[in-house]
Amino acid sequence: QRTELEAAVKNEEHKARQLQQVQQALAGLLAGGSSPSIDALLAVASDQLAEQLDAAHGSEVTDLGIFRAHAAKYEREFFEDMSALGVRCPDVLTRVVEFMPEVVDYVQRIVDNGMAYESHGSVYFDTVKFREAGHVYGKCKPSSVGNATLASESEANFETSEKRSQQDFALWKAAKPGEPSWESPWGKGRPGWHIECSAMASKVIGAKMDIHSGGEDLKFPHHDNELAQAEAFFHQDGCRQWVNYFLHSGHLEIEGLKMSKSLKNFITIREALQQFSARQLRLMFLMAPWNKTVSYGETMRAEMRAKEQAIKNFFQNVAVALREGEAQQAGTAAKWGADELVLSAAVQEAQVKVHEALT
């Protein structure tokens, strides 16, 4: 709890410094006496201007295609970045806008199972009924259950009077001006933050998931709420544990703070690839313990260059040794003996067991 509080204080201090920097930059632009250009204003205060424009005119956006085009832009850039890093495409690609009927049906089934309720056009998960049905809420991070600060990060107007319990969370939110919305039995609205993951994963994988991954900051409320939704959905099937194992990875830090778009302290993959090679970036993550923080900076860049060179030298030495070995074997007997046959059989048996375990 203390670590989380300290991190929250650091985040707020960072935001305050950024706001002060923007104010100073704007003051500098206005000090010249003439009106600054649009490009100059956007260069120093694009995020603040975007928030003001959204507040003033966001409700005028009603075309769902605009929202989809915005998401498609970043989806396209994401896959381009993954290709540049040498990361293979996923076996299944899910977009929540293509699973809206499944999301609505998912919410309806949780309602039918008595663990959700409608209120003023929204639908909320009933954490009290969920526990009464024999389930456990807050498996990933029990100490955070009831923490309104953490819970409200994922849901606007979290402390609404529409809910029966303050721990309840939204499965479906009634439509608001300027937000994309879809038809449902409860009126026009949109999915809550957590429901789309449970609905899409359940559709593709089913009532049992072996491994689920994500950042450590998603333990609560996101992953705990995902678990609750899925167990409530599959309640009649006897589901009490939707996921067997969670792998919560550590954060990437820049300047001692978690890399975060909301904190405006992030670097894009394209920017990183101007300083690292793709192999060096992959090495940076592979060399760090998967559940620990990785600090991005000049020290890390120098270290990864050295690691990459060491690996290159190793494989060059291996190649030389193989060529020398092949030259020495010329003219010698190549027939396997008993030891080689036993070793080959053991390797093949191990391969079969690995493939069976993965299917």
Image (cartoon, rainbow, N blue to C red):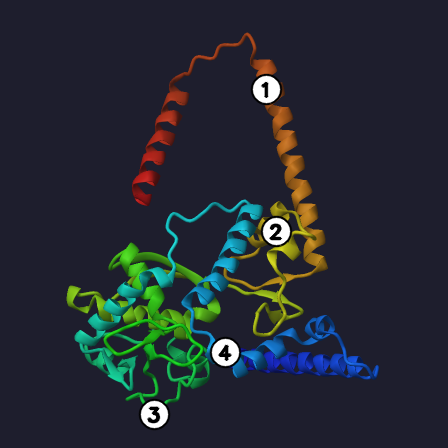
Residue shown at 58%/47% (left/top)?
A: 84
| Image position, residue 356 (x, y; %) | 29, 40
Q: Mark 4 or mark 3, which is nearer the start of the sequence?
A: 4
Residue shown at 33%/76% (left/top)?
A: 189
Q: Is residue 52 left or right of residue 351?
A: right
Q: Secondary structure at mark 1?
A: helix
| Image position, residue 16 (x, y; %) | 65, 83
**Residue 58: which disc?**
4
Q: Mark 3 or mark 2, which is nearer the start of the sequence?
A: 3
Instruction: Look at mark 1 in the image and give the residue it sits on.
Output: 325
Of badges 2 and 1, nearer the viewer stands 2
Q: What distance separates the C-alpha of mark 2 from that of mark 4?
A: 38 Å
Q: Mark 1 or mark 2, which is nearer the start of the sequence?
A: 2
Question: Depth check: 171 or 236 in front?
Answer: 171
What is the quadrant of the C terminus in the image?
Answer: top left
Of badges 2 and 3, nearer the viewer stands 3
Among all residues in the image, which is located at the extreme left? 236
Instruction: Look at mark 3 in the image and give the residue it sits on.
Output: 161
| Image position, residue 316 (x, y; %) | 65, 31
Amino acid found under the numbered disc labelled 1? Gly
Instruction: Look at mark 2 in the image and give the residue it sits on.
Output: 281
Amino acid found under the numbered disc labelled 3? Ser
The quadrant where residue 207 appears: bottom left
